[in-house]
Amino acid sequence: MDEHLTVGRVADLAGISVRTLHHYDEIGLARPSARTSAGYRAYSPTDVERLREVLTYRRLGFGLREIADLVDDPTTDTVAHLRNLRSLLHEQRDRTAAMVEAIDRELEARAMGIRTTPEDQLKPLGARLYDDIGHAYPVTRRTEPRIAAQVWAALGDARTVLNVGAGTGSYEPPDRDVTAVEPSAVMRAQRPPDAAPCVAATAENLPFADQSFDAAMAFSTVHHWRDPIAGLRELRRVARRVVVFTHDDSDAGWHRRFWLSRDYLPEVADLVTGRPSVDELAAAVDARIEPVLIPWDCADGFFEAHWRRPEAYLDEHVRRAVSVWTRVGPEAERRAVTQLRDDLTTGRWSERNRELIHLHAAELGLRLLVA
């Protein structure tokens, strides 16, 4: 079977014009690299993968220049693009569902002869809609102010701060001169317009001179680095102070202490095999280790955040915001969610974790390294 698709066939399948494909070809965004037996240009399976990414990002509202940066990002493979696209599409679906619900409410009001206010008419188009319909679009990843205060206090009197593995900009101190480093174009594209300037680079090879910054910080990112020790030493090289938020992967520090990994998702243990321990990370930059408590109503939706709100883990939006769930695989995720739902229904979870019910904060292995 010939896996190569002609330009016309691709246009028919994708529901776009041949002219659009020619334009993408001309600007180097998505080019057919193969030839049919008759000598016509055609799309190989790899070309189709790239075009699929281009078209999906385009339909999500990204500009062509942004799309070029995203699909050409050397740190993001096809699987990573698919996961990101899936997340963005879920977000778009939820925004649409929230707007439909708001419009349904207005239709019901008008059917009863109630005239909606101008403010109510505009809400479906604005961000405040998600405050009104929180269940339709839960906010899962935000800066937790109590944890941020501990991180920012550790920065001391630093005025210039390098944020490495910065992602979308959470926990960047608003009162300092911040420079961000983020290798993923997908993450850089999601930084808000008023976020700190962001450089495309990796932790292991920072493009800055020695002691360029008062402080370097890294928040919940070290476990994604190819070589965490080398990355931390780079932070030490470019800054006089280093502040790193990470976690203790040991059995005592995390696996057995947190009920979700202990009772429902033991596969988490396999994810940290072979990684440097928190003690080894601290030793690499001669850092002291501070515990970070998680408040019961933590605003940031990282893996351990809902330790006293177990029902949150039943929400797919909450799970999609945490890489652990993707990394353990769909089978483990389905099993864990099913078991947790059953235990919450029968009361077994409450019986097993009754000591947590009245705690205001929990120590679940989160650590701050300060050097």
Image (cartoon, grey):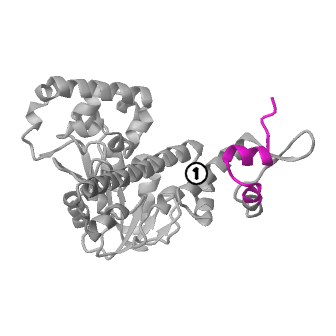
Q: Is residue 10 magenta?
A: yes
Q: What's under tag 1, amino acid-wise?
A: Thr
Q: In the rendered image, is residue 370 in sight?
A: no
The quadrant in which residue 276 appears is top left
Which residues fall within the magenta stretch?
1-22
What percent of the width, then of the height, locates residue 278? 32, 45
Judging depth in this view, the residue of 67 and 326 nearest the camera is: 67
What percent of the width, then of the height, locates residue 40? 88, 47
What percent of the width, then of the height, locates residue 96? 41, 52
Q: Residue at x 9, y 38 (%)?
A: 357
Q: Is residue 288 magenta?
A: no
Q: Left or right? Give the position of 156 relative to 202.
A: left
The quarter in which the N terminus is drawn is top right
Count up the numbered dots.
1
Q: Left or right? Give the position of 222 relative to 337.
A: right
Which residue has dot 1 on it?
56
The quarter in which the C terminus is drawn is bottom left
Q: Left or right? Give the position of 57 relative to 117.
A: right
What percent of the width, then of the height, locates residue 305? 24, 45
Q: Residue furthest left?
A: 358
Q: In the rendered image, is residue 103 in sight?
A: yes
Q: Residue furthest right?
A: 38
62 versus 295 height, above or below: below
